[in-house]
Amino acid sequence: MFIAESSSIKIRHLLVEDVYAMRDWGKHDDPLFYDYNFPKLNDMEVKEWFNIKTGRKSKKCYSILDNFNRTIGYLTIKDIKKFKKSATLGIVFDPNFINKGFGTETINLFLDYFFNKIRMRTMYLEVAKFNKRALRCYKKCGFEIIDEYKEKIDNDDIRIYNLDKYVDTEYFFLEDGDIYCFLYQMKIEHKKFCEMREALASE
């Protein structure tokens, strides 16, 4: 049932019942993280959301449970390339369970499954430059920055989240009337993951 588990978390393929549980998650107060809040969905929309997440061969979605069997997060791997043995990671947690070490533990646990159980070679991810907490977590797990680029923010998001105040910082800038956000692309390869595991084992 579970693809990976430790003393405090368990990871399994996403079930629709997990999505129903996500509707009770907490909310981020910081406007920069509003996009990470789980949306308000009715029962039909929950099933549609579940089908979108699980209906493609190039994408897989997993739920993260704590040792009380509460759904505390989910992760996806998308752009799965079987020949190159690579994929791109995405991970979201219930705001009530962040800053508790679950992110680092989940990623390390999943990377072990990703590299050693399904024999993949490279994991990528994308993270906003302003998301310092996530950056620290990813670097701790062995991910390295390989690229930096910008992404245009939807005008509706600017209006709703009042992002104008963030312009001209190290994270956002204005260009031709549009606001852009800086993003990092990061990656970790199987070899690096194994080296980190060996170093930890020898300490």
Image: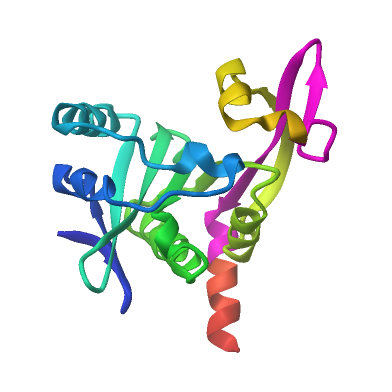
- Residue 66 appears left or right of 77: left
**Horizontal and vertical percent for residue 182?**
72, 34
Span shown in magenta: 166-193
Q: Residue at x 70, y 47 (%)?
A: 145
Vertical relation: 32 (above or below) 99: above
Residue at 59 percent across and 70 percent down: it is 196
Residue at 33% in and 75% down: 8
**Left or right: where does residue 77 sit relative to residue 151?**
left
Q: How many numbered circles are shown?
A: 0
> x%, y% of residue 108?
46, 65
The reply to whether the magenta stretch includes residue 159 is no
Write the residue at 76% across / 34% down. 165
Residue 17 in the image, given as x and y percentages of width and height: 14, 47
Is 146 located above or below residue 8 in the figure?
Answer: above
Across and down, in percent, residue 112 comes to 41, 63
Quadrant housing residue 97: bottom left
